[in-house]
Image (cartoon, rainbow, N blue to C red):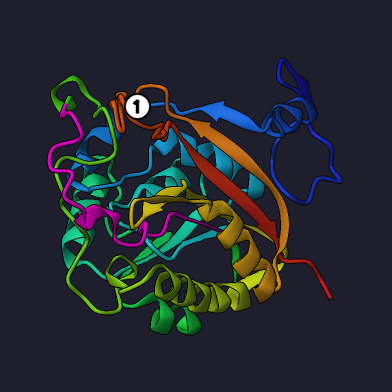
Amino acid sequence: MTDIVGRYDDRNKLNDLTGKEWLKSTKSFFLSKKCIDDKPAFNHPAPFLIKDIERMISLFTKERMTVLDPFMGSGTTTLASYNLNRKSIGIDLSKEYKQLALKRFKQKGIIGSKDFKYIVGDSLKEIPKLNAVDYIITSPPYHNILKNNSNGLRKDSSVKGYRSGSRIGVKYYSDKQNDLGNQKSYNDFLLLFQKIMEQAFNKLRSNKYCSIVISNFTVDKKEICVQADVIKLLCDIGFEFVGTIILLQDNKPLYPFGYPYSFKINHMHQNIINFKKTEK
């Protein structure tokens, strides 16, 4: 069938995109895009934006396939999946964030849907209970950066329907020992994340994809190339690295970190690091 967005190829087993749509999706960057349904998520310290996740889900799944988010938070992955007629499973340690997600779902008329499941629990224990999934997309806690002393670094513009930055003040996820955000060291964070992703790998169908949304960050005031570490640990699990898409977030405010003594970078993008589970 042909239309203004191109022709769909019946050999396409990955997604429902036409050739032109597929080609556009292979760009190594895209601009983050807001919508009005993002606003309720601003009570979460680091929410996804729905349109950004829709773009990734549409690239790596077909309708009725199942998407897993092991760190579901405010429920954006489910909203994006629902909008695209996909099923979704989310896991999070926080009952509070589940209630926030359910409130968002209710506002969109998603009530008691058989097409989504939100599990409150530890992903390390809950993922092994699941059936196979077709795509994984998630953004893990960024080690312990929400527990720093940079009080009030993010401006609240939610009255206008957006927020200039990822968080307000230093609100962190939880005090639970099994929270990735509470690990004593960066190495402990990586080891726990690897254990969780090993379980996720086991549940991902062969020749399907996984996307990790994460930026680089500082540890003990030193900039860390987190992307490199994430790629190594997922490849050690058995994933194949297939490339990074840069999610540009040009609406974030600039702060004079280090000025006028030394260069300190302002992170204005997220790395969407993509992997494939290839058949052996």
| Image coords of residue 269 (percent x, y) | 47, 34
Left or right: where does residue 280 sit relative to residue 192? right
How many C-alpha atoms fall within 10 Å of the one at disc 1: few (<14), some, or many (≥20)?
few
Is 237 rendered above or below residue 157? Answer: below
Left or right: where does residue 230 sit relative to residue 25? left
| Image coords of residue 35 (percent x, y) | 34, 27
| Image coords of residue 236 (percent x, y) | 67, 73
Image quarter in which the N terminus is found: top right
Is 249 rendered above or below residue 113? Answer: above
Is 162 rendered above or below residue 119? Answer: above
Q: Which residue is label 1 attached to?
A: 35
Taking the image as drawn, is residue 131 in sight? Answer: no
Left or right: where does residue 85 sit relative to residue 240? left
| Image coords of residue 122 (percent x, y) | 34, 78
> What residue is at 49 percent from the left and 57 percent from the top?
87
Verify whether residue 146 appears in magenta.
yes
> What residue is at 28 percent from the left and 33 percent from the top?
165
| Residue 265 location, quadrant | top left
Magenta stretch, overall SS? loop
Q: Residue furthest front?
A: 261
Q: Nearer the viewer, residue 247 or 42?
A: 247
Magenta residue span? 135-156
| Residue 42 location, quadrant | top left
